[in-house]
Amino acid sequence: MPHDLPKAYEPGAIETRWAEYWIKEKLFSVPTPPPGETRPVFTLLLPPPNVTGRLHMGHMLNQTQMDIIVRWHRMRGFLTLWLPGTDHAGIATQMMVERQLASEGKKRRDLGREAFIERVWEWKRHYGGAILDQMKRLGASVDWDREYFTMDENLSRAVREVFVRLYEEGLIYRGKYIVNWCPRCGTAISDLEVKHEEVPGKLYEIRYPVVGTNEFITVATTRPETMLGDTAVAVNAKDERYQHLHGKKVLLPLMNREIPIITDDLANPEFGTGAVKVTPAHDPNDFEAGLRHNLPQIDVMDEHAHMNENAGPYAGLSRHAARERVLEDLRKQGFLVAEKDYTIALGKCDRCGTVVEPRLSTQWFIKIAPLAKRAIEAVENGEITIAPENYKQIYLNWMNNIHDWCISRQLWWGHRIPVWHCAGCQAMIVARETPAQCTKCGGTKLEQDTDVLDTWFSSGLLPFTTLGWPEKTRAQEVFYPTTLLITAYEILFFWVARMIMFGCHFMQGHQQDPQLKQASGWGDKKDDSVPFRQVYIHALVRDAERQKMSKTKGNVIDPLEIIQRFGTDATRFTLAAMAAPGTDIAFSESRTDGYRAFANKIWNAARFMFMSVDRVEAGLRPALAGSETQSHTGVAGFQPVALEDRWILSRFNGVANYVNEALATYRFHEAANRIYDFFWGEFCDWYIELIKPRLAPENGAGKESARIACGNLINLFEAALRLLHPVMPFITEEIWHAVYDEHPPLKSVALAAYPQANEKQFDLAAETEMAILQDLIVNVRNLRAELKVEQKQRVPIQVFAAEPAIRSLIEKNQGSVKRLANVEEITFAANTLAKLAGARHTARFDVHVVYERKIDVGAERERLKKELARIEKEMANLQRQLGNEQFLAKAPSHVVEGMRKRQQELVVLLQKTQSKFKELG
RNA sequence: GGGCGGUUAGCUCAGUUGGUUAGAGCGCCUGCCUUACAAGCAGGAGGUCGCAGGUUCGAGUCCUGCACUGCCCACCA
């Protein structure tokens, strides 16, 4: 028998054992079904963590939510595919390996491109699996047989295919533009990879002498060092201050170069001096102005943001040193006329924090507007839904203001751009496979473009490339569009938007297997090109002080450490219970500790159950067997003989309903909390306590009655385990196997059916009656506490109930009352007991504890005073409302009815309370 | 410069579409080692729902303004 469980729940060994079991048994592997499959389909793509990643709380929240939804679907009979993988993460991984090389005193250029890439692969083979191993510890029920890596050969081929197609469609172009350049990473980065940070800075005013006059024109700039590359000064044509200078030239200080004064809207008369220096090679606005006016582009910096030969005497200096020197020289020569405090939005590299340099360079771009058009439509017309809904607007705003996307990176690690340059004729050959010779001149000296693609280029394709694209596969018919995407807000633009653009473009015309589409509930959707039908954006996990976690702040909470201390189930439960849609989570260890206690509670309830089973009927199993688990509703094999049976059965079905509805709308916290309250507050605190006498046949309850009680307990428990399983997969799996005495009908509770409510098992009368009994018991306990009755002392009570039904209810269940309130004898009074000093009353009954000690009259009076005030206030409110004809006319009838009922109760309560208050003097 | 959120018990947070008495966990106070669980049980105290208006029969919930606070986006030097 496995029933001799340890007294305290120890999650560690149990969790690792089941995690391994699930993988070994391939429980979550889903072979692509052939045509004819009729089950509804649920597909979810795991947002691929970086191979270099270490599991953090964000991952854990994300994966917990996904796993809950995935397990829930699987248990409801969906053909459920959760596709895992990792991202090659260009910059991050390259940095990682470069750091490793640095510790050996080497640089990547020492190795050369090929050897370096081989080195990265080696690194990946050694350490790349770490984050997925950590996922396994979380219990993520993914299909490991389909694990992908974004640099896998098949995915790389798909990337080249996409590049070539986009190029052929004119949606990819190459050109020399200003891009965001990270001097430390040595590569271009996209707009999204630049984080703006407001920092205090200076606005400098520099005067340039106007050639042929004694005048100066004063420009304002935050970046004086770029003046070395100035090729014009712009003023606004309408600005009267400068109209006499139109067409004149200025002599650029320090460089002694003559540059024109141009008129352009770039200059805003309201800002600074109204005149602006124009540096086409170092500012995107100036670049545009330069094109408009045919200005030369003078690049004064190199790839490390050091000044180059174009910077004359400043060559070799870093941009920061150059700024100081330039300012110093301007000051000395009398050109610097003002320095004003000014807040600058400084752009920093998302990856390394280095200040980004707008740099003129040749890059590859995707023309985004045509792709964005359909991506906007798909969301606007509801082909893709985004929840919480406010993110829909954020998405649309962003998409409507999107710029072209710079996709080339000057890195070595990544998908190399499939373009070859002919050394002979300079032709560019864009091809899926390495060409043997130049298509123009036939030359064989071809060199592949040295750039690689932005990592998000390949991850944006994953919804279809992981399903075999560009081939047309059965997997796509079944699993595309994927059903849901659960992800963090921060990658809404990086990833989600790009997947939508690519999906809508490349899967245009795709159709999901109509039968499966219908079965899965998407019959009303027209567009099967979308990468997913739904998006759910989850919150950010912050630390207990609501601070964003960051390494520099040192406030990062390591989920693995939390798991170590409290268990995976407790940690998962915490994240679920705190995840109200739309609000960030302040992670709190005390909450996790509370849920560890919850796991322990479940464990001990199981121990109790097993002890009872072993005593009453060893070998008793739940009524459900095998295939039945997929079709039944409510609790099987449950025989409601007593009030508490009818009550708990009804409650269980109510909870099942509630939880299913909550999960359907991503209300994880409501689902988790409802299960918690049910299991602890109702099942353990009341139900188990109530049935204890029936479980002990030696108490005279009878063997058959004990057998029924035991059966109910085990069947209910089994159902509760299934209900809880998506949130706490480990402990439920462990106990579920034990419930079936290690011979479960299925390999895992994860494959059993998720509880659905059974209408026939609802029993509102039982719920009402039970509430009255609970009320009575709590009142007696309360009185006992007030009278300071010894815990063990059994006392007689008197009860008055005006309604015969209530009296008979109490009579019938007096055994329960006696046990749970430690009552010796119940006698029924003929008249109200409300006046008695030591009595308690409700609208339905009065109860008095017969005991020699008297209550504290003063305290009782205070309590009553408060209560009276409350009742009177509520009465007044009710009377006001019920006396209002408009209210009676407009309010829904159930509200009016409810208030009338409440009013009747209050009348009784008020009367009783008043008379007692008088009695106390 | 735009946009979005938050403000409810000592602390951290819930509070579906407005509807009867605003909840939980932790913490606090009192009493219990009652053979499932002291990681537990029983009882209790604690809130003018940020401020000011408005809509409504009815507002924690909807609207406006204000205050404080957080986040995202942004090529005005």
Image (cartoon, helix red, strand yellow):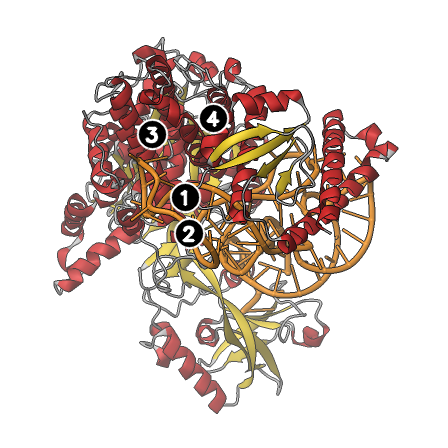
Q: Which residue is mark 1?
A: A575
Considering the numbered disc 4 on the image, is that residue within a helix, a strand or a loop? helix
- Counting residues from the start of the chain, the first of labels 4 and 3 encountered is 3
- Amino acid type shown at disc 1: Leu
For label 4, count other residues whose C-alpha is less than 10 Å away and answer few (under 14), some (14-19) or many (20+). Answer: some
The x, y position of residue A557, in whole percent, is 34, 55
- Amino acid type shown at disc 3: Trp
Q: CA distance from mark 3 to mark 1?
A: 20 Å
For label 1, count other residues whose C-alpha is less than 10 Å away and answer few (under 14), some (14-19) or many (20+). Answer: many
Residue A689 versus residue A330 in the image, above or below? above
Q: Which residue is mark 2?
A: A587
Eye-nearest disc, 3 or 2: 2
Q: Nearer the viewer, residue A788 or B14?
A: A788
Is the residue at mark 4 from the same chain as the one at mark 2? yes
- Counting residues from the start of the chain, the first of labels 1 and 2 encountered is 1
For label 3, count other residues whose C-alpha is less than 10 Å away and answer few (under 14), some (14-19) or many (20+). Answer: many
Give the letter of the chain under mark 3.
Answer: A
- Amino acid type shown at disc 4: Gly
Considering the numbered disc 2 on the image, is that residue within a helix, a strand or a loop? loop
Eye-nearest disc, 4 or 3: 4
Residue A176 versus residue A633 in the image, above or below? below
Q: Which residue is mark 4?
A: A815
Q: CA distance from mark 1 to mark 2?
A: 8 Å
* Residue located 42% across and 40% down the image: A576
Q: Are marks 1 and 4 in contact (CB under 8 Å)?
A: no
* Residue located 70% across and 51% down the image: A865
